[in-house]
Image: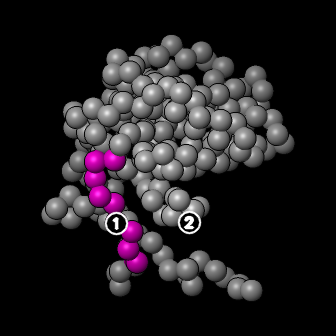
Amino acid sequence: MDLQTIVNKSRSYRRFDESHKIEGALIRDWIRLAQHSPSGMNAQPLKFWLSNTPEMNDLIFPHLGWAGALKDWGGPAEGERPSAYILILGDTEIRETFNVDHGIAAQSILLGATEAGYGGCMIGSVRREEVRKALGIPERFQILLAIALGKPAEQVVVEPVGEDGSVTYYRDQNSVHHVPKRRLAELILHDV
């Protein structure tokens, strides 16, 4: 796949085939992508907590918020939950702030997952202290972001923003997830 295809296929998937396990070696390959991604001042303050067992996944899942725009949906049902998670942590003994490092790392991870036929979702709505307590994460690590990973079990369609101007994603009567995107002409303020 070329990069444009990988980016186009990299959507925020929230329902997965939970029976499809993701091997630790593959997850570590995705961490290698994050390892080689840019880092502010090259400080490299990020650490990664990997989970691919049902037992650890069950400790993480209840502390995540899923699809805030879908008010009547509480998250994936059993069987549709992620097969793996990556928690991105900031090591406060290296830096006090992490700027956009975790977003860059997360995008690299998700592009790698997409290339390998998987999908995922960056989740910023994390009940951080509950996750810290459930997993025993030391206080020196700030919980920045969770990435849910698995074999996608839903269809996500990208479409132009409608006449109403809403960019809010939604699901139709067939449970197809629709993601409105602004036109390129709206994004570019000064063209070349």
Q: Can see residue 1?
A: yes
Question: Of the numbered discs in the image, which one, if any, rests on residue 86?
Answer: none
Q: Is residue 19 above or below residue 190?
A: above
Instruction: Give how far across and how far down residue 103 sits, in percent.
Output: 61, 47
User: Magenta residues, as a range?
Assistant: 152-161
1 or 2: tag closer to the N-terminus: 2
Q: How many angstroms separate mark 1 from mark 2 (CA)? A: 16 Å
SS of the residue under disc 1: strand
Q: Is residue 7 above or below residue 107?
A: below
Q: Is residue 10 above or below residue 142?
A: below
Amino acid at dot 1: Val
Residue positioned 43% across, 47% down in the render: 117
Q: Is residue 4 above or below residue 62?
A: below
Q: Nearer the viewer, residue 20 or 55?
A: 20
The quadrant in which the C terminus is found is bottom right
Counting the numbered discs, the total is 2
Instruction: Give how far across and how far down residue 33 sits, in percent.
Output: 65, 41
Q: Nearer the viewer, residue 23 or 154?
A: 23
SS of the residue under disc 2: helix
Q: Give the class, few, some or many, for how many residues have Cα within 10 Å of label 2's Cα (few <14, many ≥20).
A: few
Instruction: Give how far across and how far down residue 149 sits, in percent.
Output: 42, 39
Residue positioned 51% across, 50% down in the render: 115
Q: Nearer the viewer, residue 96 or 87?
A: 87
Residue positioned 61% across, 47% down in the render: 108
Question: Of the numbered discs in the image, which one, if any, rests on residue 157?
Answer: 1
Is 64 one of the magenta-colored residues? no
Is residue 153 left or right of 132 when viewed as pictured? left
Q: Nearer the viewer, residue 111 or 39?
A: 111
Is residue 73 left or right of 151 when viewed as pictured? left
Amino acid at dot 2: Gln
The residue wearing badge 2 is: 4
